[in-house]
């Protein structure tokens, strides 16, 4: 069996199984088995595939046909052009979250001195956000998650990218462990924010069947966790601190209401804005805290 034959097999079988984008998936899976980039694969189209690599590839293909995400099959996903270890105890890092990171960096860079307190990453999952911020900002970060299994993945990623001395991983349900002491000047979070309605209507089979519900389920309107974070802000954040939270595409209006002065946030929040991603969808809640 040559490379090209196996790529054709993947395209055909994935299409039959109703999986979109089978061409690319086949290339990624076979490339991983042969330790070749996609370009290298095409250049080696007529290469005989060793028996062992062929067997591994066909096993991967079976998993993909059952809708397992490529990132879990390969145990890795690229985020911010860096490889991150993933497994089903963490959400697979998404491009939307790169937008969140860009916003945080844009806010920090021009006025480094201003944000000299600690940075907090709530619901850190695989640690992708914390690792990138630690690398880009050379700052210390506290990364919190409720799941020990997720923190184990985050730890591996911190070691892999050599920021384990800069990122402190903490197991907590949001921030109960950090009550009082307004230590943090910057909070970033990609919390679970999917509403029950969206969960009921059905997510993609890849998401519904394999990704951790704990990392997705944001309660009835998807805003439960963000509402809890709001309550904690005056306890954990320095006055004048800044907050960036990833949100769902339609949650902007509800969050503007949640953080409006009339909703009792007058003392807490100086400015609130919803940042739209490159597809024009609500994606990030940005708060500038007041001097309370
Ligand atoms: N963007 C994710 C999804 O729609 C949700 C991520 C989250 O809840 N933090 O699958």
Image: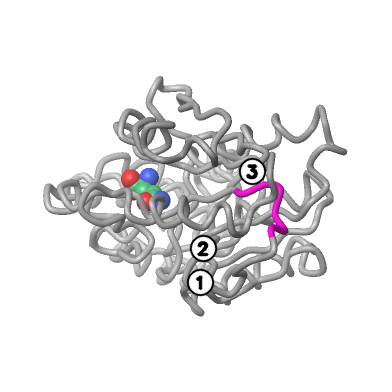
User: Which residue sits furthest right?
Assistant: 113
How would you classify the magenta stretch by its main secondary structure? Answer: strand
Disc 2: which residue? 125
- Residue at 58% x, 31% y is 270
**Quadrant location of the N terminus in the rendered image:** bottom left
Dot 3 lies on which element? loop
Disc 1: which residue? 150
| Tag nearer the camera, 3 or 2 | 3
Magenta segment: 182-187
In the image, is residue 4 above or below residue 67?
above
Quarter assignment of residue 113: top right
- Residue at 45% x, 65% y is 90
Residue 42: x and y in percent read 53, 39
Quarter assignment of residue 177: bottom right
Judged left or right of residue 203, residue 249 is right
Judged left or right of residue 161, residue 199 is left
Tally the marks: 3
- Residue at 82% x, 69% y is 165
Dot 2 lies on which element? loop
Disc 3: which residue? 292
* Camera-side residue of 122 and 34: 122
Dot 1 lies on which element? helix
Q: How crowded is mark 3: few (under 14 residues within 10 Å), some or many (20 or more)?
A: few
Q: Does the magenta stretch include residue 166?
A: no
Whether pointer 2 and pointer 1 mark residues with C-beta atoms closer than 8 Å, the reply is: yes
Residue 284: x and y in percent read 48, 35
Q: Residues within 10 Å of mark 2 (few under 14, many from 20)?
A: many
Precedes in sequence: disc 2 or disc 1:
2
Residue 34: x and y in percent read 56, 59
């Amino acid at each position: 069996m040559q490379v090209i034959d196996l790529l054709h097999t993947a395209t055909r079988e994935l299409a039959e199984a109703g999986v979109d984008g089978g061409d690319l998936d086949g290339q990624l899976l076979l490339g991983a088995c042969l330790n070749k980039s996609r370009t290298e694969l095409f250049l080696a189209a007529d290469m005989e595939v060793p028996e062992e690599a062929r067997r591994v590839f066909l096993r991967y293909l079976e998993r993909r046909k059952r809708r397992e995400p490529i990132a879990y099959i390969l145990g890795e996903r690229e985020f911010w052009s860096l490889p991150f270890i993933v497994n089903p105890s963490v959400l697979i890092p998404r491009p939307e979250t790169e937008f969140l990171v860009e916003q945080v960096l844009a806010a920090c860079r021009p006025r480094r001195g201003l944000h000299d307190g600690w940075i907090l990453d709530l619901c850190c999952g695989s640690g992708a956000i914390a690792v990138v911020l630690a690398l880009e900002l050379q700052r210390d970060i506290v990364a919190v998650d409720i799941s020990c299994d997720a923190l184990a993945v985050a730890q591996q990623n911190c070691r892999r990218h050599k920021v384990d001395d800069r990122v402190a991983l903490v197991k907590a349900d949001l921030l109960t462990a950090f009550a009082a002491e307004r230590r943090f000047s910057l909070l970033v979070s990609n919390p679970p924010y999917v509403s029950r309605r969206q969960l009921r209507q059905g997510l993609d089979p890849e998401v519904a069947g394999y990704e951790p519900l704990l990392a997705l389920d944001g309660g009835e309107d998807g805003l439960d966790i963000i509402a809890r974070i709001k309550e904690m802000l005056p306890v954990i954040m320095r006055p004048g601190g800044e907050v960036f939270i990833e949100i769902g595409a339609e949650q902007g209006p509800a969050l503007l209401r949640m953080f409006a002065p009339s909703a009792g946030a007058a003392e807490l929040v100086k400015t609130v804005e919803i940042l739209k991603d490159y597809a024009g969808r609500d994606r990030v809640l940005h708060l500038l805290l007041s001097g309370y």
